[in-house]
Amino acid sequence: MRKYVWLLLVVFTQYSCKQEVTTTSIAFGSCGHEDEEQPVLSLAADYKPDAFVFLGDNIYGDTDNMDTMQHKYNKLGSKPEFQKIRAAAKLYAIWDDHDFGRNDAGKWYPFKKESKEIFLNFFNEPAASERRKHEGIYHTEYLTKNGKTIQLILLDVRTFRSDLLLFDKKNSELQQRYFYPLDYQPHASADSTLLGAEQWKWLEGELKKPADLRFICSGSQFAIEFNGYEAWANFPHEQKKMTDLIKNTKANGVVFLTGDVHYAEISKLQEPGLYPLYDITSSGITSTWSFATPNKNRIEGPVMDNHFGLITVEWKADPVIKMQIIDKNKNERIEYTLKKSDISF
């Protein structure tokens, strides 16, 4: 009898082990002011993610003085909440405008090389990293677990970006569609750029590399409609170049992680010949905004309270991707789930 019970226990244990599903979790957020407390980072650390991605405006530098820039990074680094997330998860980072140097700045910012050095040093970029050998901060990292690989593509939407096209106030027809003044309007010609030639060439090579899932991280939102503020929609030819590149490389499993706007939402961009492109925006570690702009591609949100994003991948035969927005009070405000087969050719 005892032998029979023991055999049942062995079989049950083996069966239970086979049912365990390996997971990878990535937390992410943007727009945290170094002068303010950041409980969102502490909360994110409690979830014990495998990684945390800072999606830009990680400080509000807004300066041409690199001593000031360094001082502001030092303030962030001294925060117990930042130290907690650094101890809990592997950190990855890109920048947006305020930590690049100036509001809405692009390639003409005169201290981008000095700012880059401070940025990379703060996030402990290895001395031999390829990131230190080329202009800009674009880079790829990999998260691997039990033979499953996530490709984390970190874009630089500042170093090479052409000037934005200021909104022409004579364009009253366009302005009438919006309840707030527009800052910018889309570039009509393709002689302007967001990523720059070298970064585009690099990105094509990265998308050809094998990976089970790919998260493309961008400081500016990718999949939203034009709203008169900063976004990929100001460079529609660059936006199309991205969708065409994903088509041409047959890169499966692409999802965008974005920041900047001081609220959270999920957008879904659909193009002929391409699976749906999802863009999960997490923006507001400390920052908030009074309204969300129109976005016909929005399928979840907006969430106007401070929050962080969390992606949990269950590595089943058809991997399951759960996307969440969790606010500062630990309330789950958004949950959206899809499968890899939903974002594959």
Image (cartoon, grey):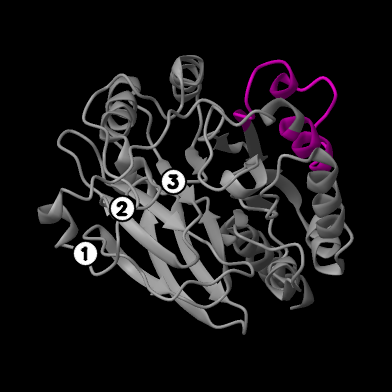
Residue drawn at x 39%, y 52% is 279
Question: In the drawing, does residue 233 fall left or right of residue 312?
Answer: left
Q: Please give the label number shown on residue 178.
A: 1
Residue drawn at x 85%, y 24% is 127
Residue position marked by numbered label 3 in the rendering:
256
Magenta region, residue range: 115-140
Q: Is residue 129 visible?
A: yes
Which numbered disc flags the more N-terminal residue, 3 or 2?
A: 2
Q: Quadrant of residue 65?
A: top right
Q: What is the quadrant of the C terminus in the image?
A: top left
Q: Is residue 146 visible?
A: no
Residue drawn at x 29%, y 67% is 180
SS state under label 3: strand
Q: Are marks 3 and 2 in contact (CB under 8 Å)?
A: no
Rounded to the nearest angstrom, the CA distance separating label 1 from label 3 is 26 Å
Rounded to the nearest angstrom, the CA distance separating label 3 from label 2 is 21 Å
**Number of callouts in the render?**
3
Question: In the drawing, does residue 254 fall left or right of residue 174?
Answer: right
Residue position marked by numbered label 2 in the rendering:
228
Seen as rendered, the residue at the extreme front is: 170
Which numbered disc flags the more N-terminal residue, 2 or 1?
A: 1
Question: In the drawing, does residue 23 fall left or right of residue 296?
Answer: right
Q: Are marks 2 and 1 in contact (CB under 8 Å)?
A: yes
Q: Position of residue 50 (x, y in %)?
A: 70, 53
Does 327 appear in magenta? no
